[in-house]
Amino acid sequence: MIDFNAPYTLCINGQAQPAPNQLDVINPATGQVFAHCPAAGSAELDAAVSAARAAATSWRDLGFDVRAGYIARLAEAISAQVEPLARLLVQEQGKPLGQARDEVGRAGALSMGMTRIKIETEVLVDDAERHIELHWAPLGVVGVITPWNAPINLAVGPMTAALYTGNCIVLKPSPFTPLCTLRIGELMRDIFPAGVVNILAGGDELGALMTAHPGIDKISFTGSVATGKKVMASAAGTLKRVTLELGGNDAAIVLDDVDPVAVAKKLFFAATVNSGQVCMAIKRIYAHETVYDALCNALAAEARNARIGNGLADGTVLGPIQNCRQYERVKGFIDDLRKGPGTMLAGAEQPTGEGYFINPVVVAEPGDSSRIVTEEQFGPVIPVMKFSDIDDAVRRANYTRYGLAGSVWSADTARAAAIAARLEVGTAWVNQHRHTMATVPFGGAKESGMGRNYSLLGLRGNMEPRVVSILKG
């Protein structure tokens, strides 16, 4: 059980550990510090890596089924703490309580789903001369660096994938949202053998130390494109393996046969869930000219009716932006939109007062070269563009350095699927957006990432292929 009244501690070698420095954690609904936690440095990192390396062989030798049992115990323990974890998540991250509960529940479900995937030796050749097999071996120690937008789900998922495949881990949450991860570390100290799981809160400098550390064999990073490039460059010094799930600029293409009012509700949610702070949220909408005006009006109505407020308050639809730096960035997009050429249909007036709150914005025809179209806003600002020719819509959707995901919306699913297959993305959805499963790989094309999470493909990203070739005779 988690003692939610106890001081926060690091988890190193199965023990609660303090640190000489601390992080201030801000509640984004107030803009004020509400908690403190220890901040690890190089000494704590070295201790964690040493503990993980010492435990690696015995953890590897337990086998998949035994390791899956440990993960099942973790999932059960998290499930027993959904409400207090969700409330703490709202305080440090800002999202509405219902979304926070969903995140906590999803973390356990995805973890259990991955442990049902079998990773078996493959026979490549078996003839009169040779028997050749392909084995999959754990890498050793995986460093997991997680972001602030979904700190529970994006910690537990990559962490349990690495653990299930036989690796020990050193995990660092974002300095903006370290608290829930540290509390989950309390659960893990009572479940996993010493050294297998190590959780260190710390600033950005700790992440740089992890990516360069010679005792870490792989980095699993979720975050921005700019930081992902730094992670990759730093990891190159020791030729670490990397999985990078980076930003997106997901386009939704809306065809001429949809019900614009019905589709608007789904598009609005997919664009503004967690106040738009989702890597695979809809960031751009391209709507056919015959439904364009009706869709824009329906989206604007959704925006005007969405209740903004503290995530713990009843009826809140959109909580605050998570941190001041991102809040100022989103406000910068809105300031640019006020200069034209687009038309702001909702959100021209923004709240004042405490907290990092943004009213959702819908803007019509801002121009293909505008920042809101070419960059990832990571906030509740929705640009809507018109098209008449589907080839032009696909070209515009693909004209980006991002390639995480996208979607096509139509009453004719076969027609939509053919268009979706042309999107240059890691995942293309039809009549849905943001759907993921433990058995389906997820990750980005172009600058939206490298490697995949979830599925057999994602699990193997935590392992090294090893060929065993036997000469008969």
Image: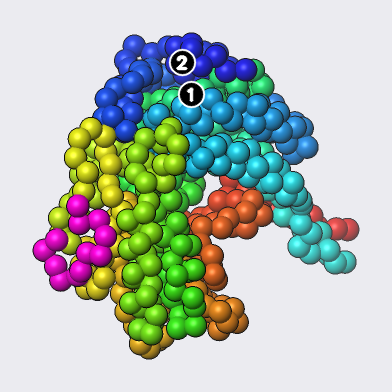
Q: Are marks 2 and 1 in contact (CB under 8 Å)?
A: yes
Residue 402: percent from left, percent from top: 37, 63
Residue 242: percent from left, percent from top: 47, 47
Q: Amino acid type of disc 2?
A: Thr
Q: Which mark is residue 144?
A: none
Q: Residue at x 54, y 70 (%)?
A: 431
Q: What quarter of the picture does the N terminus occupy? A: top right
Secondary structure at badge 1 equals: helix
The image quadrant that residue 133 belongs to is bottom right
Relative height, residue 360 to residue 342 (above, below) = above
What residue is pinned by disc 2?
Answer: 9
- Tell me if residue 339 is in the magenta stretch: yes
- Decide if residue 18 is on the left or right side of residue 128: left
Q: Amino acid type of disc 1?
A: Leu
- Tell me if residue 251 is in the magenta stretch: no
Residue 126: percent from left, percent from top: 83, 63
Colour basis? rainbow
Question: Quick one: label 2 or label 1, which is nearer the N terminus?
Answer: 2
Relative height, residue 412 to residue 428 (above, below) = below
* Span highlighted in magenta in the image: 338-349
Q: Which mark is residue 182?
A: 1
Residue 308: percent from left, percent from top: 34, 44
Q: Residue at x 48, y 11 (%)?
A: 6
> For the residue carrying disc 1, how many other residues have a C-alpha within 10 Å: few (<14), some (14-19), or many (20+)?
many
* Residue 290 visible, this angle: yes
Between 201 and 333, the residue placed more toward the observer is 333
Q: Residue at x 37, y 75 (%)?
A: 294
* Residue 74 visible, this angle: no
- Decide if residue 338 is on the left or right side of residue 317: left
